[in-house]
Amino acid sequence: MIKIVILGAGNVASHMFKAFHASKTVSVVQWYNRNLKTIDKHKNKVDVTDDLSALIDADVYILAISDDAIESLSEQLPFENKLVVHTSGSSSLYAVDKKQNRGVFYPLQTFSKSANIDFKDVPICIESLKKEDLPILKQLAEAIGSKFHKVNSDQRQALHLAAVFVNNFTNQLYRVAHEITESQGAEFDILKPLIKETANKIETLSPYLAQTGPALRNDKKTIKRHLKQLENKHHKAIYNLLTESIKKTYGR
């Protein structure tokens, strides 16, 4: 049984606690957060604390906290030579204080507290300073049904940057589309099958081959018509930027 301590109480920490708590091969022996009220409701399931000096012995300490807090919190840990990992996609392995055995356990997925997550659909990117620490990180991923990927810091940071494009930026485009449909009283839900099919296509096609639309065809009349329809200058700028990007990609 692998004993872990979770530090932090945000979206990632909350989902990780739920997943690890249900595991038969991992025991969450403690949950730390500086604001005890946030995790106090779980005190019947796990030992909770807001006192770093009260942290108990474990095999792995998971820092599921903001990127800016990793260095500071890891420096304050009252022990040395323990496997301490952070869950950040963009922070360096070396953000963890050098007195610890450093590692990364990065779940590449979008997390919202109100949305259920099946970790079978969450790839875990793992990294450790010491090779002998990798097996335990692999076991942690397997314990919650996730596939693990051994990546270095540069690869992980590239994946995190790419994730912003495919997730955060795409979701913002959904929001723009929602505003456009709302402006004419059309139902945004009518677009949902298209959204799903677009995502499904890249299971079998590269994004390059999956592209369709007026920019790919260099359909100047349609592009001009769309730009005329857009009254919001911000939306117009986004349309122009992405249209030019597609045209450049395909030499139009």
Image (tube, helix red, strand yellow):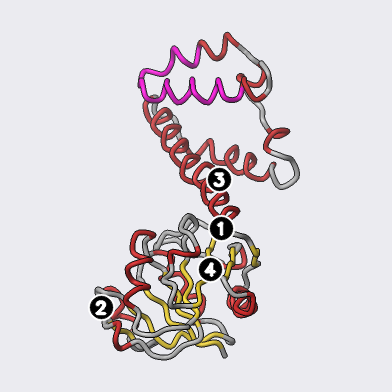
Quarter of the picture holding the N terminus: bottom right
Spatial separation of the CA atoms under disc 1 and disc 4: 11 Å
Q: Is residue 238 magenta?
A: yes
In the rendered structure, are the residues bearing label 2 and label 4 in contact, judged by CB atoms less than 8 Å apart? no
Task: Tell me the amino acid under the disc marked 3.
Answer: Ala
Q: Which residues are magenta?
A: 225-246
- Which of discs 2 and 4 lies nearer the camera? The answer is 4
Of mark 3 and mark 4, the one earlier in the sequence is 4
Packing grade of label 4 (10 A; few <14, some 14-19, many >=20) is many
Q: Between tags 2 and 1, which lies in front? A: 1
| Quadrant of the image containing the C terminus | top right
Task: Identify residue for label 4.
Answer: 105
The reply to whether dot 1 and dot 4 touch (C-beta < 8 Å) is no
From the image, give the main secondary structure of the stretch colored magenta. helix
- Say what amino acid the circle numbered 2 marks: Leu
How busy is the neighbourhood of tag 3: few (under 14 within 10 Å), some, or many (20 plus)? Answer: few
Disc 1 element:
helix
- In the image, 174 versus 150, the foreground residue is 150
Mark-to-mark CA distance, 2 and 1: 32 Å
Q: Which mark is residue 223?
A: none
| Residue under numbered circle 1 | 153
Sequence-first disc among 1 and 4: 4
| Percent of width and height locating residue 112 | 42, 59
The amino acid at mark 4 is Phe
Q: Helix, strand or loop at disc 3?
A: helix
Please state which of the two labelled residues, at mark 1 or mark 3, is closer to the viewer. 1
In the rendered image, the residue lying farthest to the front is 98
Q: Are marks 2 and 1 in contact (CB under 8 Å)?
A: no
Q: Residue at 50% of width from left, 77% of height from top?
A: 101
| 1 vs 4, front mark | 1
Residue tagged 2:
36
Residue where numbered disc 3 is placed: 162
